[in-house]
Image (tube, rainbow, N blue to C red):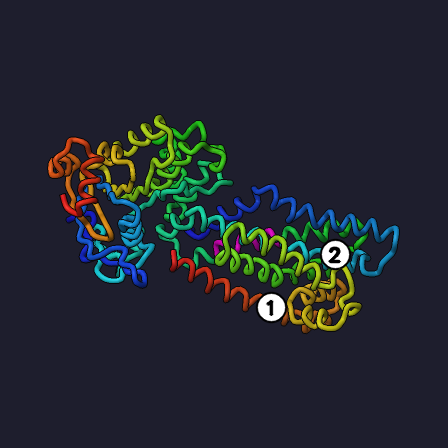
Amino acid sequence: MKGLAFSKRNDLEVLRDPLNLFFGVGFPIVLLLLLTAIQANIPVAMFEIEHLAPGIAVFGLSFMTLFSATLIAKDRSSSFLQRLYTTPLTAGDFVLGYLLPIMPICVAQSVICYGVAVLLGLEVTVHIVTSILFTLPVALLFVSLGLLCGSIFTDRQVGGICGALLTNLTAWLSGIWFDLGLVGGAFQKIADLLPFVHAVEMERAALRGDTAGVFPHIWWVSGYAAAVTAAAVFAFLRQMKKQ
Amino acid sequence: MDAIKTVELTKNYKDLTAVDGLNLSVRQGELLSLLGVNGAGKTTTIKMLTGLTRPTSGDAFLNGRSVLTDSAAVKAMIAVSPQETAVAPNLTARENLELMAGVHGFPKAQARDKVTESIGRFGLGAVADKRAGKLSGGWQRRLSIAMALISGPQILFLDEPTLGLDVLARSELWDMIRALKGNMTVILTTHYMEEAEALSDRVAIMKSGRLLLTGAPAEIKQQAGTDKFDEAFVRVVKEGQP
């Protein structure tokens, strides 16, 4: 009950920020429309809707890190958290209260993304539902990354790190916009060591209905999600103690 | 039983002793102002009393409950209105109050009643459904205190409640704080000497982590040999003793 009140507050804070709505929902839709339009004129296999939609679904989730981190960093800087630390809320209430409310927003974003993709020609199959379910570990990874960054950085730093750096890393190292194999070398090796390309490949496989193709990517994504979540909980509790 | 009793309460940060063996008692229903120049140890004292910081040594008891061994019980009986207006900006004033009622574990129906009562008591009706972040400083401060009080705390900590407010908003907040006297124990920190003098039953003056003296404003003026409270405060702090 206590934790629920805090979760509800966090949900409202994120959903009522118009910038969040634009970047969370509007921007992925704009990208889908734009790239589909380009694809219609200059056909590129990369931008075919069944290839593009999973990538945009993952890329859209990277903004959740920014939302989550900004919320936490602002709460820390405004002494709002200090006020709440003097209430009966427990450490678990805080961690879950920041992580859980953003997950349904992630799912809603993925539903909208695939919904728009259907309008743009994506075949309606049960695999869309599977793909949306497979976004859950990806969502946890990005939301936890937000908790981690929000616990360490100030709200200004968060804008640069999560808003610019992370979204660019996700864009460049995920294979959404170009085939990483074309670049090869160290670039591809680094990309393969990070979770972003695995998240996209996992989603693409899920949308194809290729169960075997989901592996080993899901292990990469889940492993990163678990590690980042653990680090985020540790960082949050540490700053909580410091307060 | 005292509402607050500190016993040799001490906090060290590496080489710095922020609070040094503080022994302070606050009576039930009393409004005590904690005064001191920057670095005197007021904020650290408040942080220890509210469970935000663990004392290095010593202990503090709030209505008999130790901040060291019974922090959950302490948190259930206190409320804090921080110096900065700590409100959720994208929530309405009403939702902010609902949030505080919720985190204190009130059932939905009771929370709703408490929010309605609080809106009436603090005259927040005109702004109840406006987002807190859009309210003026005075309204935000008023909301902040209402948020602190919604749980019906036995002990209230007000940290610089009127900082940066205009004369009218300050006067209105003073009236609100006066109305609390006797109903609950209030610890107030402020840099405004006229505020401490107007509102306090007693003041406690700290310097370099140590308690210099406690007493009613009139007693402190008398001991310092002046009829102006701000002068008395300066003398006490400069001389280290009245």
Residue B77 % position (x, y): 28, 48
Q: State left or right for residue A204 relative to residue A165.
A: right
Query: Nearest the camera: B83 or A7?
Result: B83
User: Secondary structure beneath disc 1?
Assistant: helix
Please rate how many residues cluster around mark 2, counting C-alpha atoms within 10 Å: few if below 14, some from 14 to 19, many from 20. many
Q: Any magenta on residue B134? A: no
Q: Earlier in the sequence, mark 2 or mark 1?
A: 2
Report whether residue B30 is seen. no
Dominant SS in magenta: helix
Q: Quadrant of residue B242?
A: top left
Q: Which residues are magenta?
A: A96-106
Residue A53's disc is: 2
Q: Distance from label 2 to label 1 (Cα)? A: 21 Å
Q: For the residue marked with disc 1, what is the amino acid?
A: Ser
Would you say residue A103 sits in the magenta stretch? yes
Give me the residue at 87% from left, 56% from top. A43
Frontmost residue, A91 versus A158: A158
Per the image, the residue denoted by label 1 is A222
Kindly state the secondary structure of the residue where label 2 is placed: helix
Identify the residue at horizontal 40%, vertical 30% (top origin): B124
